[in-house]
């Protein structure tokens, strides 16, 4: 049963996390040395490199809004050794914020309303800092993050089961429609046109 309590306070993003954009650094394709460390851009992993600039749990928000037109989220979580280019804002949750909750909250936003570009949608740092976030107490954040993480895992499992069933159907159709596998029928019921 969900209990309703006092409304959560609204805080600006800059008040609940450190924005680490000053550390991000692009590497041109010709200057990248291949490795096993993820190199992130606005929408996720762009490549793999041999060095890192971050080694912690962070939240990235895509700066460029190619995905916003469809209303898709530009926020995602990263952890461990990583390199981030200049197309994603880098956020480190403060001690009062659960980073998983922060990421999920930011995933739920429609970034089109924060657009600061006219031709190409863009989320600049000044606008990013002022994004309003509803902030429950940390224990509630943890519980919300846990419930939503479990729901995500269930969805992933169901999506994999669906993909497996679709593959099984495709294989069965191939066998049935080519005659490699036959279906038993009652000859008296068979009607041929």
Image: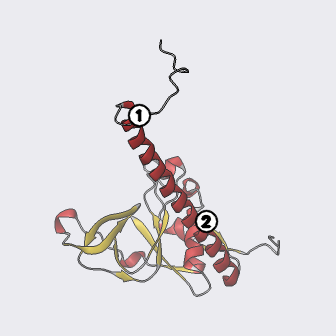
Asked if residue 81 can be seen in this view, the reply is: yes
Which residue occupies 32% across, 72% down? 38
Which residue occupies 50% across, 56% down? 161
Task: Classify 10 Å Cα crowding around label 1: few (below 14), some (14-19), many (20 and above).
Answer: few
The front one of 120 and 31 is 31
* Residue 133 rendering spot, x and y as whole percentages: 64, 70
Task: Tell me: residue 3, above or below residue 56.
Answer: above
Task: Tell me: residue 46, above or below residue 54.
Answer: above
Task: Tell me: residue 30, above or below residue 117.
Answer: below
Quadrant housing the N terminus: bottom right
Q: Is residue 96 left or right of residue 125?
A: right
Distance (Cα) linking label 1 and label 2: 41 Å
* Residue 57 rendering spot, x and y as whole percentages: 46, 80
* Residue 114 rendering spot, x and y as whole percentages: 56, 58
Quadrant for residue 44, please give it: bottom left
Task: Tell me: residue 188, above or below residue 175.
Answer: above
Report which residue position mark 1 lands on: 182
Which residue occupies 82% across, 75% down? 6
Q: Is residue 51 left or right of residue 106?
A: left
- Of the two numbered discs 1 and 2 on the same chain, state the one appearing first in sequence: 2
* Residue 22 rendering spot, x and y as whole percentages: 39, 77
Task: Classify 10 Å Cα crowding around label 2: few (below 14), some (14-19), many (20 and above).
Answer: few
Quadrant for residue 80, please give it: bottom left
Circle 2 SS class: helix
* Residue 151: mark: 2
The front one of 28 and 102 is 102
Asked if residue 85 can be seen in this view, the reply is: no
Which residue occupies 50% across, 29% down? 185
**Residue lying farthest top?**
193
Q: Nearer the viewer, mark 1 or mark 2?
A: 1
Circle 1 SS class: loop
């Amino acid at each position: 049963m969900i209990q309703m309590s006092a409304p959560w306070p609204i805080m600006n993003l800059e008040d609940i996390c450190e924005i680490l954009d000053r550390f991000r650094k692009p590497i041109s394709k010709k200057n990248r040395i291949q490795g096993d460390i993820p190199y992130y851009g606005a929408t996720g992993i762009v490549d793999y490199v041999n060095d890192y600039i971050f080694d912690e749990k962070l939240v990235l928000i895509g700066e460029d809004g190619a995905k916003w037109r469809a209303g898709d989220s530009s926020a995602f979580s990263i952890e461990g050794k990583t390199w981030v280019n200049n197309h994603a804002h880098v956020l480190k949750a403060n001690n009062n914020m659960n980073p998983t909750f922060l990421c999920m909250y930011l995933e739920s936003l429609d970034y089109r309303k924060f657009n600061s570009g006219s031709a190409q949608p863009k989320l600049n740092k000044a606008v990013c800092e002022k994004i309003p976030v509803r902030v429950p107490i940390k224990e509630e954040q943890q519980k919300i993050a846990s419930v939503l993480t479990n729901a995500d895992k269930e969805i992933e499992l169901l999506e994999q089961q669906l993909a497996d069933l679709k593959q099984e159907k495709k294989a069965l159709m191939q066998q049935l429609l080519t005659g490699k596998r036959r279906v038993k029928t009652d000859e008296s019921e068979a009607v041929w046109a």
